Amino acid sequence: MIYTISSCRDDVEMILSDDIAVNNPEAVKGYKGFYLLNEGNMGSNKASLDYYNFSTGVYTRNIYAEINPTVPKEMGDVGNDIGIYGGKLYAVINASNKIEVMDAETAKRIGQIDIPNCRFIKFHKGYAYVTSYAGPVIIDPDYRQIGFVAKINTATLKEIGRCYVGFQPDELEIIGEKIFVANSGGYMGAGDTEGYERCVSVIDIGRFTEEKRIDVAYNLERIRADSRGDLWVSSRGDYKGLSASLFFIDRKKEAVTDTIPIAATNYWIDDDLLYAYGTEWNNVANDWQIAYRIVDTRTHAIVKREMITDGTDKEIEKPYGIMVHPETKDVYITDAGNSVTPGALYCFDKDGKKKWSVRTGIIPGHFALLPNDEP
């Protein structure tokens, strides 16, 4: 639905939310639904927020715009991460240099936190921790602005400290009283492979200082902990001769002790399984190679090389986000398509068969499960 309103947006065209029944109602005890953050094209201020309700089976697109009609430019430019903590929903809007804070139940805007070139967010004991590239969005081999992790008081929504890490830090994970940060050096590596960073920064939360670095591989991006507190880190390679890979960091040794030779562009760990999709450029085929795999985090073996079993993976042009429901084990995968027009969300059952799909916003990529606090 398209509607033109007069407001702080100076009579801009506003796309209101719309509801689509995509599935039969589900009785899921632990969660009400999930939010999906769509990145939008960079420079277009088209980041948007969708919501899926488990109990009704209804998917609603672009809820932020209608719920918050007086916010200029709506969510902003490039939604990069999303999380729920303490009854609040946090959306990291990278190129707009801010975190949008909303009520987790209603998506009504509470305020914003200004963080330059912010990337990913995690929470711990009343605080949010956010990675930042620190400087402007720019691909420059001579870029020398070191990145940092910002510490934010979730009660006041004020930044209260910064811990400087490597260049262009991406995902972070919190285990015990330590933060682990995957540094990429992505801006600097564009000209030469050795321009990339290759370390995970380890931050002591109490002192909020970097205590050491763990050498892993060039151009790191994702970092997630398994049920034992060990870490899984992905390298994107150099898009030339250096292949993407997945690395295992033993938390006690704080060192890489295993390598799984697969591209893990994005992944989700549920129970003892790591669900990953990989998109990697093949210079020989002159095309992107896409694979869906499941890795056992206990044995490090690839237990499934075909996560999607009914052939419907051929419908997905460019996988971009992934989530596994902790109870039903349904697997949700987003498709960015051509990254210009609206993308899609696919739901597969635990056996890898497609249940349903729906159109989303532009470049759908980031999930946040909404817990059900009712008894």
Image (cartoon, rainbow, N blue to C red):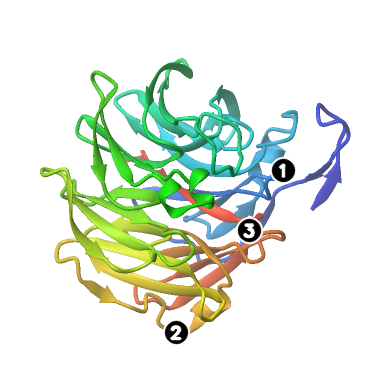
Task: Give the vertical position of 303 relative to 74 (above or below).
Answer: below
Q: Residue at x 24, y 42 (%)?
A: 214
The answer to which of 350 and 298 lies nearer the viewer is 298
Q: Secondary structure at mark 3?
A: loop
In the picture provided, is 315 more to the left or to the right than 198? right
x and y percentages locating residue 158 in the rendered image: 48, 16
Task: Give the CA separation, mark 3 to mark 1.
Answer: 19 Å
Task: Give me the disc on residue 324.
Answer: none
At horizontal 75% and vertical 28% (from top left) the residue drawn is 70
Residue drawn at point x = 66 percent, y = 60 percent: 339
Residue 40 on image: x %, y %: 66, 49
> What residue is disc 1 on?
43
* Residue at the (17%, 47%) spot, across then down: 255
List the residue tagged with mark 2: 310
> What secondary structure is found at the residue carrying circle 1?
loop
* Residue 94 picture quarter: top right
Q: Which mark is residue 360?
A: 3
Q: Residues within 10 Å of mark 3 (few under 14, many from 20)?
A: many
Q: Quadrant of residue 204?
A: top left
Residue type marked 2: Asp
Residue 322: image x %, image y %? 44, 59
Does residue 185 appear in this view? Answer: yes
- The residue tagged with tag 2: helix, strand or loop? loop
Q: Determine crowd level at label 1: few under 14, some 14-19, many 20+ residues with C-alpha closer than 10 A.
A: few
Q: Nearer the viewer, residue 370 or 324?
A: 324
